[in-house]
Image (cartoon, rainbow, N blue to C red):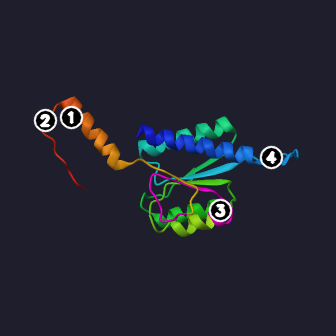
Amino acid sequence: MKLKIKLFLFMVTFLILFLSVKQLNTGIPTVEKKKTIAVIVKTKNNDFWKTVMIGAEAAGKEFGVNIEFSCPPDEKDSDAQIKEVNSSINKKVDAIVLAACDYEKLVKVSETAIEVGIPVVIIDSAINSSRISSFIATDNKEAGKLAGKKLVELAGKQCNVLNVKL
């Protein structure tokens, strides 16, 4: 989980730097409006997403970027999440970071954002599109292997383990 948070924070930082430096190449002095990144996640009701919010807001303050953090009222409410993405498109945000709650339903709206020039970074859960800017997630199978090895290291080879499938 710590690796996942570090990867997310790295990507947000990279995106902020990219959006900041992108305008420096014109050579024409301009007054820039503050960039805005929409971070749309599945829920605010667990520690992981609360940590993501804290990290995104800290990166935004550090790099002078507005972070608009939102989520649907229910973790599985893809229609509400689509409305959040559409709202971000209508506000003309500079980038969208999205933890999609549905692999298929968030494709069209994500690709619409891309078509109007808004980079989309997907975190945590993939969507069925090859057009996104980047995808950041934990390799859950590898994480499970590492957890199993650590369990054996801590408990020994003679312990009993119950595997519960949900």
Q: Position of residue 29 (x, y in %)?
A: 88, 44
In this rendering, is residue 76 above or below 8? below
- Under tag 4, what secondary structure? helix
Q: Is residue 98 visible?
A: yes
Q: Are marks 2 and 3 in contact (CB under 8 Å)?
A: no
Q: Position of residue 111 (x, y in %)?
A: 59, 66
Query: Closest to the observer: 139 or 93?
Result: 139
Q: Which mark is residue 21?
A: none
**Residue kind at label 3, given as amino acid type:** Ile
Residue at image mark 3: 89
Residue at image mark 4: 25
Q: Is residue 123 magenta?
A: yes
Residue name at image x 49 percent, y 38 percent: 6
Residue name at image x 22 percent, y 54 percent: 165
Magenta stretch: give its range: 114-130
Q: Quadrant of residue 12?
A: top right
Residue positioned most to the right: 28
Q: CA distance from mark 1 to mark 4?
A: 54 Å
**Residue kind at label 4, given as amino acid type:** Asn
In this rendering, is residue 72 above or below 4? below
Q: Earlier in the sequence, mark 3 or mark 1?
A: 3
Q: CA distance from mark 1 to mark 2?
A: 8 Å
Q: Are marks 1 and 2 in contact (CB under 8 Å)?
A: yes
- Under tag 2, what secondary structure? loop
Q: Earlier in the sequence, mark 1 or mark 4?
A: 4
